Amino acid sequence: MALKTGAQYIEEMKKMRPNVYKWGELIRDVTTHPATKAHIANVAMWYDNSFDPEKEELYTTTSYLTGKKAHRWNTLMTCADDVLGNANMKRDGYRMCGSCMGPVCAGWTVINALWGVTWDMDKALGTDYHERLKKFAMFAEENALALSGALTDAKGNRALKPGQQDNSDMYLHVKEVREDGIVIRGYKNQICGVAGSQYIMVIPTTSMSEGEEAFAVAAAVPRDAEGITVVETRRPSDTRTEAEGWDGIKSGTTQAFVIFDDVFVPNERVFMNGEVKYAGACVGNFTAIYRAAIGACVAGQGDVMIGAAIGMARANGLTQKPFQDKLTQMAVNNETTYGLGIGAMYMGKQHPSGAFYPNPLLAHVNKVHVATLPYNTKVLAQEISGGITETGCMPSYQDMMSPVYGKQLIESLRAGVGGEDRIRMARLVEWLTIGGGVPGCMHGGGSPDTAKMVVKGATRWDDYVDYARSLAKVEAPLKEEKKKK
Ligand SMILES: Cc1cc2nc3c(=O)[nH]c(=O)nc-3n(C[C@H](O)[C@H](O)[C@H](O)COP(=O)(O)OP(=O)(O)OC[C@H]3O[C@@H](n4cnc5c(N)ncnc54)[C@H](O)[C@@H]3O)c2cc1C
């Protein structure tokens, strides 16, 4: 198949075993339930974009494995241009959907991250993980699968390592090794787009040490496998049911807590089992790709925020001119994260396995900006747009529809355009700036503090002191004594 339409994707989602819950209820059909259907429709739009002559170049590429045309999210990235293709597709996707789409992002990134790790393991340890991964990647491409990616474990007490927790389920782990596979259990929390995915790609969330072999596990697991329970989280978009009749966007992405309760994974879908030394590289490769590309994600949403802010100014009866400085700053913010991500890509390297990894230092610097600049863009969007874009400052849709006072409310909101259009644009600004549309700028893809740790580790501080000493002609070495542990 290799390429699938949105309608085919939706048909396949309907056939999955219902195991997604929200508000205490089992969701029988994720494609029609109000909590998940907008997300599924957005992912379907990405599939359909692959057939749009104007967008196919963004959403498809030539497969490294088969030489055939495939959805971009089912392919291996082997050069900087491929990662740029990833970034450009996401920027476009954000412009279309306003938010992120986990099933066409995170699982794909996991496969690319594992590509180099499994290759290294096979070379050093004589395992066959890379061959298994290759077969799964071919299967994912051939079936045009939507894949979520689960790194984040529940983690329990953050001061303790996985092996030190009082409940081993705080980190996903191998409970039992059988001849034909493994049984895994534990909690993966805050995973994006699980409801819209067909497989969950799991890898460790952190590096592991000797004694933590059970937690060093990577695998591909069907989202509806026996033993998996998916609980959708509560997002601000929950308040946006069909009742908010004029909202163009009804929800953003979906997020979930995933409970693995003794889930059997056959050997051919296991890509790491106990190799603690390689757990850290899974996260390292993942974040290098993800944090280079996420600059484009937030820029895509920033593009919509600029449009919505100008739209509000005009709907308020004003022009763009009085706000130009703020709008220009918003554009600077967008292009900073997009451009820095591109820098990380072109300073990256190809791994001997064929996978390409962006430069970690620049990718992590980008993550720090992604955790700050989009929030500034949101503040500016609200400032330009006025008070009705802040949560709680506009009557509900039901009140607007009141036969008693509805017409007066709508008339009171008329400015540069009719009241209804002004309300629609205001609701979009609210959703983008403080609603369900806020992407994981702060913690999505890991916290900025962890990114700063990489920046600290990768920066050559003492070399910089030497540059300064040389220019200042200081003879003293100005070195710090290393403290004995
Ligand atoms: C919108 C969104 C989408 C996401 N999508 C996915 C996804 O698709 N897949 C996935 O796997 N995950 C996903 N995540 C989860 C994300 O990766 C985590 O939120 C992130 O890694 C931070 O983990 P945490 O939320 O548990 O925060 P915590 O680990 O509790 O961190 C909170 C703060 O404490 C600091 N901290 C933590 N431990 C220590 C320590 N030992 N010492 C000092 N400081 C510490 C952190 O740096 C941070 O500043 C998503 C998150 C969001 C918000």
Image (cartoon, helix red, strand yellow):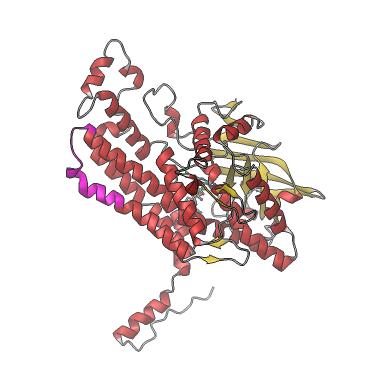
Front one among 456 and 6? 6
From this view, report whether residue 182 is shown above or below residue 347.
above
Q: Residue 342 is drawn in which quadrant? A: bottom left
> Furthest residue to the front?
53
- Residue 16 located within the stretch drawn in magenta: no
Horizontal and vertical percent position of residue 6: 55, 35
> Furthest residue to the right?
179
- Residue 328 located within the stretch drawn in magenta: yes
Horizontal and vertical percent position of residue 441: 42, 48
From this view, report whether residue 441 is shown above or below residue 476.
above
Q: Quadrant of the C terminus?
A: bottom right
| Residues drawn in magenta | 315-331
Asked if residue 81 lies left or right of residue 13, the reply is left
Asked if residue 259 lies left or right of residue 464, the reply is right
| Residue in the image at 36% along x and 52% along y | 372
> Furthest residue to the top?
404
Let me know if residue 60 appears in the view: yes
| Residue in the image at 18% along x and 39% along y | 319
| Residue in the image at 59% along x and 55% along y | 76
Q: Residue 262 is drawn in which quadrant? A: top right
Horizontal and vertical percent position of residue 325: 21, 49
Q: Quadrant of the N terminus?
A: top right
Horizontal and vertical percent position of residue 7: 57, 32
Q: Tag count in the figure?
A: 0
Front one among 86 and 60? 60
Asked if residue 421 lies left or right of residue 37, the reply is left
